[in-house]
Image (cartoon, grey):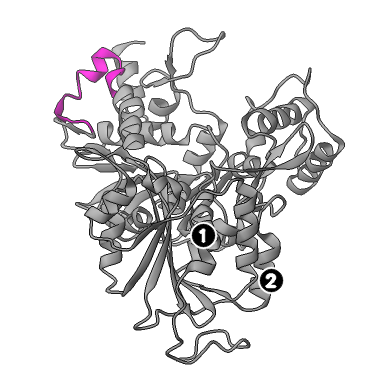
Amino acid sequence: MTPDELEKNLSDPWWRLTSGFLYQILIKGDEETEGLKAPFIPNDHQINFIENLHYRNIILKARQLGFTTMIAIYYLDCCLFGEGNTRAGMIAQDKFAAESLFRDKVKFAYDNLPPEIKARFPLARDSASELLFAHNNSSIKVGTSMRSGTLQYLHVSEFGKICARFPDKAKEVLTGSIPAVSPNGIIVIESTAEGEAGAFYEMSETARKNKESNKELSKKDYKFHFYPWFGATEYALDQYGIVITEKDHAYFDSIEQECGVTLSIEQRAWWCATRDTDFSGEPQLMWQEYPSTPKEAFKKSKEGCWYTEQFTRIRKEGRICSVPYREGVPVNTFWDIGNSDGTAIWFHQRVGMQDLFIYFDEGWGEPYAYFVARMQAKGWIWGTHYLPHDGAHARQGESANLSPQQMLKNLGLKNIHIVPRVSELIHGITRTREALVNDVWFDETNCKQGLIHMENYTRKFNNQTQTYTSEPVKSDGHSEASDAFRQFAQVREQVGRTRAISAPLLKSASSWQR
């Protein structure tokens, strides 16, 4: 390539992104590749997205289609070759993910530019989360929030997971980061699904319906992009040794008919093998991580859920409604305590013979001080705080080995009670089922996320026997809320009964009578 040809090519954004000349990416490596890096050449999905880019974009997708990598390179390219003063931001679900995104995608692509090209773009600042370019004062930054300043480009990675596990962070994205983007800027929100709840689901559904109705989109409307698993050519596998049942074939046949595609035996084999080996035979995890249709992505199977029958009855009886805080009645809390995993808390009042759940709170990776501060801000009268059996076990604290019980005492909580461990989990499940069919009420708004977790608390599936086991699924974010509620069920008879001080709930009413 002559110098003139190079300069001509460098002026062409499409050539820069698709030629494989400029940008390198990290790869997993296999027997067909040498080393752990390769030229970035966009796949069909990525090309389709760039060709159909709108001001605001929602990507609902199967896993590992490379969208985060592609968007990182696209934003980097805009900063390097743009007119200047461009600000690009990328948001990840937590600090670790943000650091990884910046290091392995943004910084790696910049560091591995051809030397003669990289020399044109010296850095004015090179931090752990931002590259600021000296030649045009443009920058690309990665973090968990982008509230400050004005952005021309914003990417939110795995927003579904942020909404499901970090609701406060999701709110910060919606109220802080997105408004920071200029009116003519580009926003890309991409994720796999995380159930029919949260902002990502609602935004995806709105965008999908706009697409289906052929609505003319404004700059404020999100364009819907969906990329199913079967569009990826690499998702195919030799059938040898892989069992594809008649039920599986019936499912694939229905997808062919609905989507107007043909699924080869190799594609069917890959899907079944991935389900059976990676997800222990759970089809709903395949729907979530490798969806065939947008509706399937958010689908949750009720088969195998612990409390389907009980919640069907609860909803039929209208026991999910408006349940406000009752002045003067102590609030009890029931915890599932996390260390590196999640913490979940149910807030409860006993009025007469009725158990009223007025609030639910949760968080992943948050210290106990975070939850205590949120509790203290409510100004409620506190009763007893119930912790699971391991609440008395010492854990590594800030300066000493302390139990969660002692940590919470040090933060100001009083009347902390340890719930004894059940001999068998199924006994706790049975107690929970019994509690749910009694006079238990939930506030529809303030307990919404906890109810979603409870209704989707599922047993593991044994693919060999084609049956559900008595062991719960612990990896989908639903177990913490369910385990916290189980603490209530195990001590329900011991929770202090409080005289009803206001009008009782009318069984036929949809809300509490004030």
Q: Is residue 460 above or below residue 415?
A: above
Query: Mark 1 = which residue?
Result: 485
Residue type indicated by callout 2: Arg
Q: Which residue is more in the foreground, 379 or 499? A: 499
Query: Mark 2 = which residue?
Result: 313
Q: Which numbered dot is residue 301?
A: none
Left or right, 282 with respect to 138, comes to right
Q: Residue at the location (38% across, 80% down)?
A: 329
Q: Is residue 410 above or below residue 82?
A: below
The answer, for residue 291, to whether it is visible in the render is no
Label 2 Cα neighbours within 10 Å, binned few <14 / some 14-19 / many ≥20: few
Left or right, 339 with respect to 245, comes to left
Q: Residue at the location (87% across, 37% down)?
A: 246
Give whichever of discs 1 and 2 has the lower sequence position.
2
Which of the 4 quarters of the picture holds residue 111?
Answer: top left
Residue type indicated by callout 1: Phe
Q: CA distance from mark 1 to mark 2?
A: 18 Å
Q: Is residue 419 above or below residue 45?
A: below
